[in-house]
């Protein structure tokens, strides 16, 4: 485990550097917002397009992989939502807590870290996890909250979902990359070099932005946040490991990437959704803060384990 820890520490050191810059106000919230926008719309999009353009759809899509990941997520999602309802919270808050339990920071942390630690062959599986998180679960939380508030489904809700997906640069860049890959044409050398140069900024930029954004978050409702962090860091990868290794015939290397991705801390976009809808943003904030800090050890352990098979 120590060799893996030594490899993951630089990633978390970058997060820590961003956190210190944010806490000391050397990096203001406005600066963090602009850095996040640069990473989200430019650097990470360039990285995702380049990965997808050099992969075929067959290297990304796998029916057993999708079923295993969705099944593991569904089990933890239902558990987190059920526990929340037993505590007496409403449906909207229960859905947000369930989102915390299964949506990891795949875009900003998982893609750059897992590809570097597990090899270039991890790109396809981690892109599949990212696509499922963005398309399935981001849509699900929107459907639940808007459905509860409007008390019925409408074409307007479908329109909102479609617009949200079409405006997400991570989805657009992956689809565009796959479309290029389908032409069987090589990416021109100058374009590939440009994408590599711009995409190279995604890793340090994203990690620094994660840390700087954590500096503005508080740890209120610690007992609930600790439970949600346990769901995300322990129960989620455990459930995915069971479905990928014991129930569905997922190829071992892809299963290892899936399990590692499931072990990532709570994603920042869950907080954005919670804040947008006005549903328990402080609870989500605390979950992100606690899960990110604890994941230094938990994700190291998971990666050390999956590399054994």
Image: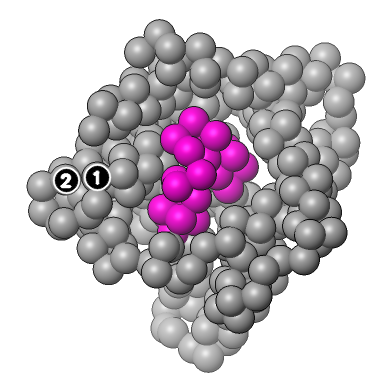
Say whether residue 117 is magenta. yes
Which secondary structure is most common in the magenta stretch? helix
The quadrant of the rendering that contains the C terminus is top left
Image coordinates of residue 303 in percent, x first then y, are: 37, 28
Q: What quarter of the picture does the N terminus occupy?
A: top left
Confirm or deny contact between disc 1 and disc 2 (CB under 8 A).
yes
Pointer 2 residue: 245
From this view, report whether residue 186 is shown above or below residue 235. below
Viewer-proximal residue, 180 or 219? 180
Q: Position of residue 200 (x, y in %)?
A: 74, 41
Disc 1 marks which residue?
A: 252
**Magenta region:** 107-129
Q: Secondary structure at mark 1?
A: helix
Indicate whether 134 appears above or below 158.
Answer: above
> What's the colour scheme?
one colour
Q: Position of residue 36 (x, y in %)?
A: 76, 44
- Note whether residue 7 is visible: yes
């Amino acid at each position: 485990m120590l060799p893996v820890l030594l490899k993951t520490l630089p990633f978390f050191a970058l997060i820590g550097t961003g956190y210190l810059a944010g806490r000391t106000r050397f990096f203001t919230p406005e600066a963090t917002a602009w850095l996040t926008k640069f990473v989200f719309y430019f650097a990470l999009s360039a990285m995702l397009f380049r990965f997808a353009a050099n992969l075929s759809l067959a290297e990304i899509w796998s029916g057993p992989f999708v079923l295993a990941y969705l099944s593991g997520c569904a089990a933890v999602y239902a558990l987190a939502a059920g526990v929340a309802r037993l505590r007496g919270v409403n449906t909207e808050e229960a859905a947000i807590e369930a989102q915390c339990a299964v949506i990891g920071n795949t875009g900003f942390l998982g893609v750059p870290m897992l590809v570097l630690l597990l090899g270039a062959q991890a790109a396809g599986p981690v892109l599949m996890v990212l696509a499922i998180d963005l398309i399935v679960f981001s849509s699900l939380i929107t459907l639940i909250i808007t459905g509860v508030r409007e008390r019925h489904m409408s074409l307007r809700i479908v329109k909102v979902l479609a617009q949200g997906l079409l405006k997400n640069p991570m989805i657009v860049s992956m689809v565009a990359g796959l479309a290029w890959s389908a032409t069987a044409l090589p990416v021109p050398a100058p374009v590939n070099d440009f994408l590599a140069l711009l995409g190279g900024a995604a890793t340090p930029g994203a990690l620094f932005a994660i840390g700087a954004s954590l500096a503005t978050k508080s740890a209120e409702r610690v007992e609930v946040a600790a439970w949600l962090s346990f769901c995300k860091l322990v129960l989620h990868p455990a459930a995915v490991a069971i479905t990928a290794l014991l129930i569905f015939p997922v190829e071992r290397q892809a299963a290892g990437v899936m399990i590692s991705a499931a072990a990532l801390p709570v994603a920042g976009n869950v907080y954005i959704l919670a804040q947008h809808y006005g549903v328990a943003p402080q609870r989500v904030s605390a979950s992100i803060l606690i899960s990110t800090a604890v994941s230094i050890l938990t994700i190291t352990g998971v990666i050390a384990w999956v590399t054994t098979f």
